[in-house]
Amino acid sequence: MYTETVMDHFKNPRNVGNIENADGVGQVGNAKCGDIMKIYLKINDDIIEDVKFETFGCGSAIASSSMATELIKGKNINEAVELSNKAVVEALGGLPPVKVHCSVLAEQAIKSALYDYAQRTNKVIKGLENFNPEEEEHSCH
Amino acid sequence: MSKKIYLDNAATTKVRKEVVEEMIKYFDEFYGNPSSQLYELGRKSKEAIEKSRKTIADFINADEKEFYFTGGGSESDNWAIKGVAFANMKKGKHIITTKIEHHAILHTCEYLEKFGFETTYLDVDQYGMIDLEQLKVSIRPDTILISIMYANNEIGTIQPIEQIGEIAHEHGIIFHTDAVQAMGAVKIDVKKQHIDLMSMSAHKVGGPKGIGGMYIRKGVKIDNFIHGGGQERGKRAGTEGVQNIVGFGKAVELINKNFDKHVEALTLKRNKLIEGIKSNIEDVILNGHPTMRLPNNVNFSYKYVEGESILLLLDMEGIAASSGSACTSGSLDPSHVLLATGLDHGTAHGSIRFTLSEEITDEDIEFVVETMKSIIEKLRKISPLNKNNAM
Ligand SMILES: Cc1ncc(COP(=O)(O)O)c(C=O)c1O
């Protein structure tokens, strides 16, 4: 059902945990739907120096979070904001159709953490001008 | 890979060796059509069917003429609901069932709503029990059928069937029960328990898949289900799956042999697993009734974690189980049964069902408890819902 890469990231998720005094924190999803993702960012000079995640959800939700954090680690925030769910799916070697929403959630979680950072630092991140974390409270899948 | 531990016996069971041996003869040795009564090969098939019918009818204290073979539990449920509805629609179009039935019942009732039938879905309490008072007040002059499952497939709760049967009969209403999970686990006596119709399935009791049964009390008004030849007294046409029927009969014969011992042994194992999980893992909720539950059913919710993740990690250790999480079913919502017992969605997503067989050893149970303990710990470390994760 899952690719080897998905199973690898599920079994040994990278960047698990939280960051004390994070510069940006974002949480998306809800328990009702069965997935919640929380992303913590440590940012220095607009570079993501560290990223951690906590996820409640199925195997693909955990793997998507792990892969997404790997893909933005060390990147400039303007690059990171462009991370799409498609890129996460590709890096994972594919997800079953019913699980694609997990990658969407990972994309949203990162955008939400970057949005939090932008709010705190009064910065404008291109691509997040119209981002509304409330609206991202999507209905289940 | 280490030993495989199969703990999904509510999904299906291993076909017993003795059953396979009996069935095999009916492929290339006794292959005659049971309707061909003029030569021996045909008669042999017919005899085998009637022997199975008698074994199963005796097991539930029915008359042989009241037992019919079907294509499985789902078919029996469909037949019971549609057959009674269409045969009695002049009397009324109201059906009473519960919120925790198998989809074979629920979706059939929904289908009938297209034809003007109305369904009342009874609530259950936190243990999955219906309320007999609610049942009584739900009965209307146009109620034609009460269909309440004997034991639930997810949480194992056993309903007070005899009392339900009494209530139905006091009001002259036909009573159907889905006993697919109950058969082989509890003593069933259709006469004493006022059961009019009962669904059964072979693959839950060590028999083959794709064969089931229906008890129809003499005199109950129900339409025929499959129209065609005269098989199953014209009620369920089609050349009989003789080998499957033989397998079903053999499986029931085997259960019957050691019934009390079998149930006692399973109950001990079940209680050991329940105790093991309760005393080793924090923040768990036992789903289903503490005592009125199937002897092989263990269903817990593990807070802060999601069921599919647990199943994947269990599979890596060779353990097969099932979950009420939406993620495992492809639907949007977690199990309708768990939600009906009042669990919130999040907690329902974190539920795991273990259903045991007699093959499970005490060592297996200890291994499962240890494995669950470390899986839940691992997943809770990742979970944003777990308040213990230091910030
Ligand atoms: C309570 C209940 N009813 C009906 C069924 C359907 O039985 P079958 O698989 O034989 O169609 C099942 C099996 O999943 C069940 O557990």
Image (cartoon, coloured by chain):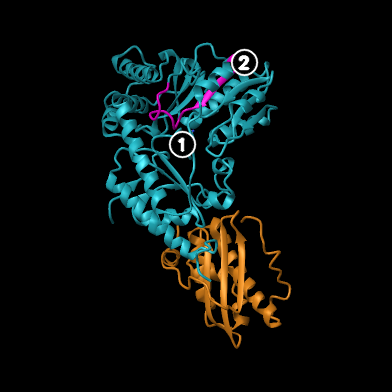
Chain colours: A orange, B cyan
The front one of B52 and A32 is A32
Chain label for disc 2: B
Q: Could you tell me residue B80's position as x and y percent?
A: 54, 24
Whether residue A106 sits left or right of residue B151 in the image: it is: right
Position of residue B92 relative to residue B349, above or below, is: above
Q: Residues within 10 Å of mark 1 (few under 14, many from 20)?
A: many
Q: Examine the rendering and report whether any part of residue B227 can be seen.
A: no
- In the rendered image, residue B89, in percent from the top left (x then y), is placed at 66, 19
Q: Is residue B296 magenta?
A: no
Name the spot of residue B253 as percent of width and height, x first. 31, 24
- Mark 1 highlights which residue? B156
Q: Quadrant of the N terminus of chain B?
A: bottom left
Which element carries disc 2, helix, strand or loop?
Answer: loop
Q: Amino acid at mark 2?
A: His
Mark 2 or mark 1, earlier in chain: 1
Q: Which residue is mark 2?
A: B171
The reply to whether dot 2 and dot 1 touch (C-beta < 8 Å) is no
Where residue B25 sits in the image (x, y, percent)?
27, 27
Query: Left or right: B233 with respect to B88?
Result: left
**Residue lying farthest to the front in this orientation:** B279
Look at 61% across and 56% down and name the residue there: A141
Label 2, residues with CA under 10 Å away: few <14, some 14-19, many ≥20:
some
**How much space separates mark 2 and mark 1, taking CA atoms?**
28 Å
Residue at 59%, 56% (x, y): give it. Answer: A31
Q: What's the residue type where badge 1 is placed?
A: Gly
| Residue B313, placed above or below residue A78 | above
Q: What residue is at 54 percent from the left and 14 percent from the top?
A: B220
The picture quadrant where one finds residue B174 is top right
Find out whether residue B179 is within the magenta segment: yes
* Residues in magenta, as a range: B170-188
In the rendered view, tell whether residue B265 sits above or below residue A49: above
